[in-house]
Amino acid sequence: SAVISQKPSRDICQRGTSLTIQCQVDSQVTMMFWYRQQPGQSLTLIATANQGSEATYESGFVIDKFPISRPNLTFSTLTVSNMSPEDSSIYLCSVGLSKRGETQYFGPGTRLLVL
Amino acid sequence: QKEVEQNSGPLSVPEGAIASLNCTYSDRGSQSFFWYRQYSGKSPELIMSIYSNGDKEDGRFTAQLNKASQYVSLLIRDSQPSDSATYLCAVTTGGFKTIFGAGTRLFVKA
């Protein structure tokens, strides 16, 4: 497994602003993922962030709204841009530790409320 | 049809009983199957993985996979109140994409 931390753990933001969420892992990993989880809902993959390549976004998510950085093998950031109340959610990063990254371990999450 | 389907529950079992959680998936090329436990307000925690047909046991947990029926289950023996959580089934498809089910809420009554 891996020890994963996220900052901030929670935040309350005004609409139209942006928030950058940080994800730090205690070991080098190739595959990192960003998810969103609405209250009472399951996980929705936003994008896959592999070091050394551009992030791959899932349908319904675009780079302008959710820019991602992956500067090294232990760190990634997700920015939620030009926020609206619909962006209120829990944002989770995960790391894939198996050969193809399918075995995932999650960070503690960031609870975001947009007013 | 959803790619990964679970009964949302809640599933309520008495303490000491066996809890049976079920999951079906649509992609026949799926290769890897996982069960995560998520306590309220917490992030998902990996508890079991299974890759081949049959049973895999780990302590009180047993994962069962039947690829022909596209079915995976999780049995929790001697259920404890601390097992009360939402259990997420996750499936890695033939295209190496991991899809999560909506989860089943389990309540274990003391």
Image (spheres, coloured by chain):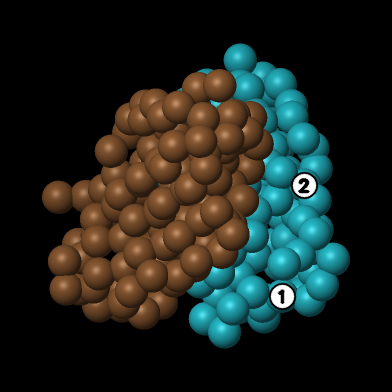
Chain colours: A cyan, B brown
Residue B2 in picture, x, y percent from top left: 21, 50
Residue A109 placement: quadrant: top right
For residue B77, which numbered disc appears in the image? none
Quadrant position of the C terminus of chain A in the picture: top right
Residue pictured at 79% horizontal, 37% vertical: A8
Identity, as a three-letter code, of the amino acid under mark 2: Gln
Residue A1 placement: quadrant: bottom right
Q: Secondary structure at mark 1?
A: loop
Measure how far apart labels 2 and 1 are at the Cα level. 16 Å
Tell whether B109 sits left or right of B73.
right
In the picture of the structure, the residue carrying the numbered disc 1 is: A29
- Is B10 drawn above or below residue B88 in the view shown? above
Residue A13 in picture, x, y percent from top left: 69, 23
Asked if badge 2 and badge 1 are on a common chain, one would say yes
Total number of numbered labels? Answer: 2
Identity, as a three-letter code, of the amino acid under mark 1: Val
Tell whether B68 sits left or right of A26.
left
- Out of B51 and A20, give the one closest to the viewer: B51
In the picture of the structure, the residue carrying the numbered disc 2 is: A6
Can residue A23 be seen?
Answer: yes
Residue B110 in picture, x, y percent from top left: 56, 21
- Out of B15 and B62, give the one closest to the viewer: B15
* Chain to which the residue tagged by mark 1 belongs: A
* Disc 2: CA contacts within 10 A as few (<14), some (14-19) or many (>=20): many
Tell whether A55 sits left or right of B88.
right
Residue B47 placement: quadrant: bottom right
Q: Given the current orientation, which residue lies at the most extreme bottom position?
A: A99
- Out of A46 and B65, give the one closest to the viewer: B65
